[in-house]
Image (cartoon, rainbow, N blue to C red):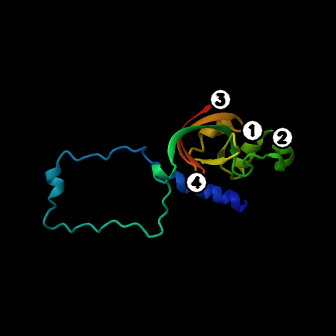
Amino acid sequence: MCRCTLGLMLAGALALAACGDGGAKPTVSAQPDKAATPPASATPPAPATAPATSPQPFATAGEGVHEGTIRGVISDSMCGKDHTRMGDDGKDPAACTKKCVGAGAKYVLVDDDGTVYALSDQKKPEAFAGKPVVVEGHIDPKAKAIHVHSLKAL
């Protein structure tokens, strides 16, 4: 696997990890008095700290991450937008994509401009390998990653 492919996979994994619950609000306890007064024998919890090198997988909305729709073709992280280097296997993009994914590549979206995006969902794209689709979700243009909310054929 080339460094480009590995970098794309790593960037996609990091970028997509933070979308999580789609911004759901935390649950508030119905009994605040019990939660606010710990028993006398309880020791205070240690403060939660993040390592200094923890990645910031999703940029804030001001840094380009947004909910949106992208049209493109489902491909694989080995070939991206060009299946021709796979010889005869590359003549059928759907078969090539499935073969590459079977060999360890990940499904990706190649948009109309040729930009390759890592996809958080690796099950839905299987049915659309080599085919044009519309993907809706959180798009991180800097990390070239999409947290997939829906995927539909064009």
Q: Is 14 situated above or below 92?
A: below
Gap between marks 4 and 1 measured at Cα = 25 Å
Gap between marks 4 and 3 measured at Cα = 25 Å
Determine the image quadrant of residue 132: top right
Picture coordinates of residue 139, whole percent (x, y)? 54, 45
Picture coordinates of residue 129, whole percent (x, y)? 69, 38
The outermost residue toward the top is: 154
Gap between marks 2 and 3 measured at Cα = 21 Å
Q: Regarding mark 2 in the picture, which secondary structure is present there?
A: helix
Instruction: Find residue 94 and name its label.
Output: 1
Earlier-in-chain disc, 4 versus 3:
4
User: Do the CB atoms of the residues marked 4 and 2 lie less than 8 Å apart?
Assistant: no
Please state if 67 lies on the left or on the right of 27 as rendered: right
Gap between marks 1 and 2 measured at Cα = 9 Å
Residue at 47% of width from left, 65% of height from top? 54
Give the labeled residue for mark 2.
91
Label 1 packing within 10 angstroms: few (<14), some (14-19), many (20+): many
User: Do the CB atoms of the residues marked 2 and 3 lie less than 8 Å apart?
Assistant: no
Instruction: Find residue 126 and name its label.
Output: none
User: Do the CB atoms of the residues marked 4 and 1 lie less than 8 Å apart?
Assistant: no
Give the labeled residue for mark 3.
154
Give the labeled residue for mark 4.
143
Q: Regarding mark 3 in the picture, which secondary structure is present there?
A: loop
Type of amino acid under label 3: Leu
Type of amino acid under label 1: Ala
